[in-house]
Amino acid sequence: MKTLVLVFHPGLTTSRANQLLTEEMEKQENVTIHRVYEVYPDEQLDVGAEQRLLENHDRIVLQFPFYWYSTPPLLKKWEDAVLSYGWAFGSKGNRLHGKDLLIAVTTGAAEENYSPEGNFKYTVSELLRPLQATSNLIGTRYLKPYVLYGVNQLSDEQLAQSAKNYVVYALNPELETLPIR
């Protein structure tokens, strides 16, 4: 299985968590790391190049820090440009059908905040629902997201172990698919 990890972090070199997750994943075979903010500092996407990357991989991982309960802005721009009608969806848009889509997200807040009883009142899975709807539209298998909670509170040792856990999770060929609702 060839895996593409698209890292959407505007300050990756200063990030404790996403930088470590990326570095650990980069050590693996059959994994392509694509640091989207570094490749496109001017945010001018090469749509054809992005589509070719997606076509050449079996599993697509969108890795990012949670920004206001959503994605960083370049990821939204990337979706709008790359996942185009006639290519990713529509009557002839089937280029991603059957591929896996995994969302890998880091949060600054602890897990207990992401519940109906918590500070934010919603789970991370609920807040990621637009990405699940996108997966449904483009015909990918939406895998159960990987969420690393409370990265600001993790020790270096905990973070290092979390990076190893992320690799094991993301590269597991038997990941659970979330049902279409």
Image (cartoon, grey):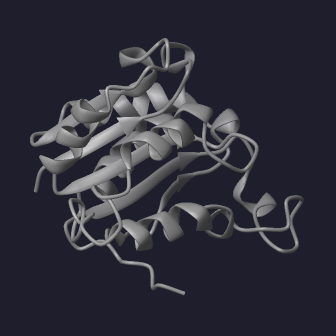
Is residue 87 placed above or below 25 in the rendered structure?
below
Is residue 176 placed above or below 78 in the rendered structure?
below
Quarter of the figure with the N terminus: bottom left
Residue 94 falls in image quadrant: bottom left
- Please tell me which residue is depicted at 20% across the width and 39% down the height of the picture: 53
Across and down, in percent, residue 17 comes to 52, 32
Q: How many labels does the image show?
A: 0
Across and down, in percent, residue 66 comes to 64, 43
Nearer to the camera, 104 or 152: 104
- Please tell me which residue is depicted at 30% across the width and 58% down the height of the picture: 86
Give left or right: position of 172 versus 165. left
Quarter of the figure with the C terminus: bottom right
Across and down, in percent, residue 44 comes to 44, 20
Across and down, in percent, residue 92 comes to 24, 67
Nearer to the camera, 97 or 115: 97
Is residue 79 placed above or below 87 in the rendered structure?
above
Residue 76 falls in image quadrant: top right
Residue 142 falls in image quadrant: bottom left
- Please tell me which residue is depicted at 48% across the width and 14% down the height of the picture: 13
